[in-house]
Image: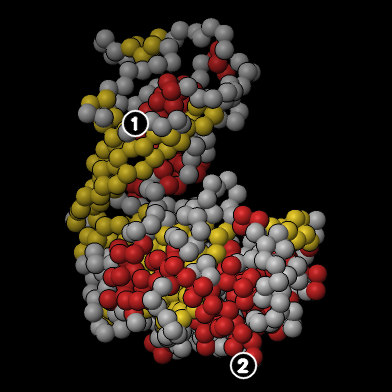
């Protein structure tokens, strides 16, 4: 950068700010001063202003510490403008930082910087929420990442709302005051109270129930610090309403308790407790259990208690999608459970060469054998006989998927099976391509295979708010259903699901799946199965084969409910 001009400003007796660096006192890790470094704060000398070179290259440790300190100490000191100038989005940061004090009514802010990891700096936050004479402490952990500012390459904080609080997303606000929605007391199907203390996975579910039913359940709002989510964008949903289209608001601190209204759910407390235990056995696991004949959701759990993958995930389902693809092939007469069906080592379509796991092949086998072993090429080989929209049609018309019209009582996604062509259409047959599902969707799929009729899953009975549940256009034929149940039963007894399903027969069926994900060492492991009138599905992200990872979780729930 050339020589930096030495600038000396005298500030009272004995106080000097020299050049571009000011002393920063760190006591017990707590920041006690703010940096006056010109690059981070936005103040520049004439020499640096005239310099045209843009700094490039990896950030040094000192640059990361300096930029993080400039931001954190200014924020702690109430210098919102200076803190905002130490980011790469000063206008957005200034609005958010100002709201932190004025809308969230947070005072006595103390920030404790943690150990840097690359360009990321974690930090602890302690503050007091004060509103009309009532006050409570708030404590949480967050993190920031230092980046180079585009115009000059100086290190600054890469601004995003999650810097202020990890649960904040674009458009969200922190607000203290009377809650917009009264609290609710959620109960299970037998009237027992459901709390996050007992069932940690239900945090997002309870938030969603409050968002939708709080105003009608008979409760009275209290005073809270909460995250007010951005308004829902139009999604085309016809039955769910805005409360199911937006992420629910989240309460962070309760200053005065409101009076809750009661909302009865379809959850079974014992099965929910078992689901909570099971997802702790595998990292990044999620599971859903429902009643096949009605669609009532009996349990839903996620190992991670943030985003609700079980209900809102959008993931390639891998070979569990072959349940729907088999329905299509049976309907078109392109496969029959007991008839011979090709399962070569490779099969090409649309310029792509597909293969089976470990490049196996089955010589002279039936379709049932191919399904049970999860032969990819048995499906790819039929792609040339299909229209681009055939799979989409069966998914929507028979399984009720992909129409964005499920209304389960809390936010959910109802799957996506887009019309695709060429290699992508072929890939969709084996649960890759553009197909996206979550455990709720796949539990519904195996339930439909078991009963022959789609029953939209729900967490709150439609009679509570007189909403209309989604329906499929048609049931599958008796012949198709019989063949589908046959191949699923065979998979549970002698195929890739046999180990997980051992001892659960005779009225059971299952399908495993593994979905490849870019830049992920192991595939996502999927498993879906029924036992009697119970249907379940689970996924373990980056877990590997579904039979080994998600399979034991789903099977344990089926055993518990039998």
Q: Earlier in the sequence, mark 1 or mark 2?
A: 1
The answer to whether 24 appears left or right of 50 in the picture is left
* The one of 562 and 31 positioned closer to us in this rendering: 562
In the rendered structure, the answer to whether residue 560 lies left or right of residue 468 reads left
Q: Position of residue 444 (x, y in %)?
A: 51, 78
Name the image quarter holding residue 224.
bottom left
Q: For the N terminus, which image quadrant?
A: top right
> What percent of the width, then of the height, locates residue 389?
74, 74
User: What residue occupies the far bottom of the structure in this picture?
Assistant: 478
Residue located at (32% from left, 33% from top): 114
In this orientation, does residue 261 appear? no
Considering only vertical position in the picture, is 422 above or below 484? Answer: above
Image disc number at residue 478: 2
Tag 1 and tag 2, C-beta contact below 8 Å: no
Disc marking residue 115: 1
Residue 194 or 143: which is nearer the viewer?
Answer: 194
Name the colour scheme: secondary structure
**Distance from the alpha carbon under mark 1 to that under mark 2:** 63 Å
Residue 335 on image: x %, y %: 71, 79
Query: Is 194 in front, or is 223?
Result: 194
**Residue 362 coordinates in the image, percent (x, y):** 67, 66
Is residue 486 shown left or right of residue 340? left
Residue shown at the point (64%, 91%) measured from the top left? 479
Residue 432: give its label.
none
Residue at coordinates 36% horizontally, 43% vertically from top-left? 142
């Amino acid at each position: 950068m050339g020589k930096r001009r030495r600038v000396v400003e005298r500030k009272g007796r004995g106080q000097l700010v020299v050049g571009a660096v000011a002393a920063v006192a760190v006591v017990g890790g707590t920041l006690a001063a703010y940096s006056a470094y010109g690059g981070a704060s936005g103040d520049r000398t004439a020499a640096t202003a005239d310099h045209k070179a843009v700094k490039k290259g990896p950030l040094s440790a000192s640059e990361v510490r300096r930029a993080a300190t400039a931001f954190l100490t200014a924020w702690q000191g109430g210098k919102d403008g200076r803190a905002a100038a130490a980011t790469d989005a000063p206008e957005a940061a200034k609005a958010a930082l100002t709201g932190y004090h004025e809308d969230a009514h947070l005072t006595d802010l103390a920030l404790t910087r943690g150990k840097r990891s690359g360009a990321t700096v974690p930090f602890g936050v302690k503050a007091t929420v004060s509103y009309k004479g009532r006050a409570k402490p708030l404590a949480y952990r967050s993190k920031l990442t230092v980046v180079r500012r585009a115009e000059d390459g100086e290190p600054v904080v890469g601004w995003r709302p999650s810097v202020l609080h990890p649960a904040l997303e674009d458009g969200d606000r922190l607000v203290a005051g009377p809650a917009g929605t009264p609290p609710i007391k959620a109960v299970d199907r037998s009237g027992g109270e459901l709390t996050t203390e007992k069932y940690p996975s239900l945090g997002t579910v309870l938030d969603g129930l409050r968002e939708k039913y709080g105003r009608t359940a008979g409760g009275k709002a209290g005073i809270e610090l909460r995250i007010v989510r951005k308004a829902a964008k139009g999604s085309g949903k016809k039955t769910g309403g805005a409360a199911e289209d937006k992420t629910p608001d989240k309460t962070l601190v309760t200053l005065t308790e409101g009076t809750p209204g009661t909302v009865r759910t379809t959850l079974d407390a014992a099965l929910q407790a078992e689901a909570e235990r099971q997802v702790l056995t595998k990292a990044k696991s999620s599971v859903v259990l429902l009643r096949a004949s009605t669609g009532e959701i009996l349990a839903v759990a996620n190992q991670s208690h943030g985003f609700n993958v079980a209900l809102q995930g959008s993931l390639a389902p891998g070979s569990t999608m072959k349940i729907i693809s088999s329905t299509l092939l049976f309907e078109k007469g392109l496969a029959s459970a007991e008839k011979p069906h090709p399962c070569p080592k490779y099969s090409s379509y649309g310029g792509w060469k597909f293969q089976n796991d470990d490049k196996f092949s089955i010589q002279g086998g039936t379709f049932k054998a191919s399904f049970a072993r999860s032969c990819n090429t048995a499906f790819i080989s039929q792609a040339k006989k299909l229209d681009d929209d055939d799979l989409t049609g069966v998914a929507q018309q028979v399984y009720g998927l992909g129409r964005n019209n499920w209304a389960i009582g809390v936010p959910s996604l109802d799957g996506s099976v887009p019309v695709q062509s060429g290699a992508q259409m072929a890939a969709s047959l084996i649960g890759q391509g553009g197909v996206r599902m979550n455990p709720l969707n796949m539990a519904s799929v195996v339930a439909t295979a078991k009963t022959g009729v789609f029953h939209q899953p729900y967490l709150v009975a439609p009679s509570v708010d007189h909403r209309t549940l989604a329906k499929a256009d048609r049931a599958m034929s008796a012949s198709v259903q019989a063949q589908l149940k046959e191949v699923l039963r065979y998979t549970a007894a002698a195929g890739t699901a046999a180990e997980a399903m051992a001892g659960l027969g005779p009225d059971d069926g299952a399908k495993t799946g593994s979905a490849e994900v870019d830049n992920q060492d192991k595939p996502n492991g999927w498993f879906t199965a029924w036992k009697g009138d119970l249907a379940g599905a689970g996924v373990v992200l980056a877990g590997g084969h579904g039979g080994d990872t998600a399979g034991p979780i789903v099977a344990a729930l089926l055993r518990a409910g039998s």
